Image: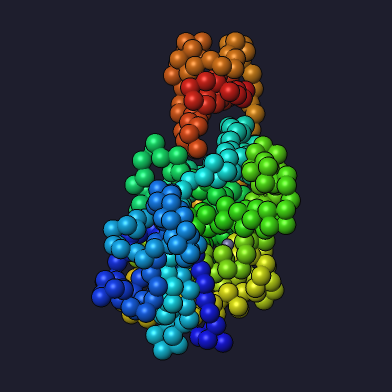
Amino acid sequence: MDQFRKLKDTAILDRPPSGVQQVNGGWRGIFFVNGQRIQVTPETRVLFKLTNLEKKVAKSARKRLTENGTESEDNFRPLSSLSEITSGMMMTYEGRRDIETGRILAERVEFSKNDFEKGEARLWKGLKVKVKPGDALGFKPVELGISNVGKFKLLPDDEVHKYVTNLGQRLIPEYLKAAPDSDPGKLNFRFFVVIEKEANAFALPNAIFVINSGLFDIVENEAQLAAVIGHEIAHATQEHTWRRLNYRKNARMALGIASVVASAYGAKDLAHIANMVEGAIRNGYARSMENQADRVGLEYMVRAGYDPREAPRLWKQMTKAYGLQVTDFFWSTHDNQATRRSYLMNEIKNNYSDLNYSQVRTNGDSFNRIRASVKEGSSLKNTIKVKSTRADFDRISEGMTYEQVVSIVGTSGELISSNELAGIKSVMYSWKNASGSNISAVFQNGKLIQKVQ
Ligand SMILES: [Zn+2]
């Protein structure tokens, strides 16, 4: 029984808190945090974790107190002002759900700083992205390589990438977008669509998102796609991989496994990190983290103006396509489609019953066109035929610029295609030779990489 069970959760705040007021010695109001409404009353203990400086002061004070025979081990003090809390901090709350209102009636709320740790930086660094140009005629697709994760075929359509990036940007919390580039913890969000049949997507802790082309066969509208991407963004913004790693580290330290304590995420642990990341991609995170990603994902959807009810509807689609089995889709292996759907429906009832549903949307103008492009791009067969030869053309070699080629052939040729994908600009020119057949050359970032006669 959810309403009687004690709940405890931790979330990273993506907005400064509002909706609560200080009342004689305590706080009253509702925090909307972690995709949930957390109600505090003057009986709720609302605390702030001591900063390092405060800890030092408290320690020396404790020393004095100990001499007097009293001692407090508490690292927390009552929250004095809402201005102490900023975006990016952690909030942990404990309480029970009120069935009437769907709110969490908090007994204890703690706020604490969330520093960008060295190990976290190392984790990000261990997941480097490399985009390898394919054979630009499309025989071999552009390859997306992610170290410690794998290699993928990038969908050869820049418009699709722009569309998905734009959708993702609208779902990302503002404070993360506003972080200065000099901030070492700034997430550089990148979205990739890869050619893969299975309806799936995953997120890496350094905000690299991979979306399978097959997902577009399942989603009916933009809001459903936003539900998937919002869920994945929440995994990154809530630092699920890092929190899971730390949880494991603490468990290992408790067991006294010295090697982990000693290396504290040095190079040796890269393999461990890779396992962790792979496990999360394949099986999802812990159930509590999947639930959090769902709730926070709904919040992102609502803020971007989408109808949150499309998230559970997506699960109906998944059942249609894959049946009612437990899957490892972007969701995890913990529950089947029906369970995930009812969880989402419950959370919508608990948290968005007062949303004005006439103001939310399910689709975007370009969704249907983009979906058609994904279908086309993922089934593209190349049909360029190799034609006859010409003496001058033999003098053209790899590495030449377009201007050098023009000076050899004698004419400027016809521009056949031009596109830019993941920072690589590809252009293809074609010339007719003396016997009327085509000769073509492909340039990437200004240099000839392939010629076809
Ligand atoms: Zn997930």
Nearest the viewer among 215 and 297 is 297
Looking at the image, which residue is at 47% across and 58% down?
Answer: 67
Please report the residue visible at 42 percent of the width from the left and 69 percent of the height from the top: 109
Viewer-closest of 48 and 150: 48
Q: Classify residue 432 as left or right of residue 84.
A: right
The answer to whether residue 109 shows anywhere in this view is: yes
Q: Is residue 250 left or right of residue 293?
A: right
Image: 421 above or below 224: above
Q: Position of residue 24 (x, y in %)?
A: 25, 75
Q: Position of residue 91 (x, y in %)?
A: 44, 63
Q: Above or below — where is 93 with respect to 89?
A: below
Give the quarter of the figure containing the C terminus.
top right
| Of the pair 389 and 122, the residue shown nearer to us | 122
In which image quadrant can residue 351 be found? bottom left
Quarter of the displayed picture in which ligand 1 can be seen: bottom right
Q: Position of residue 94 (x, y in %)?
A: 48, 74
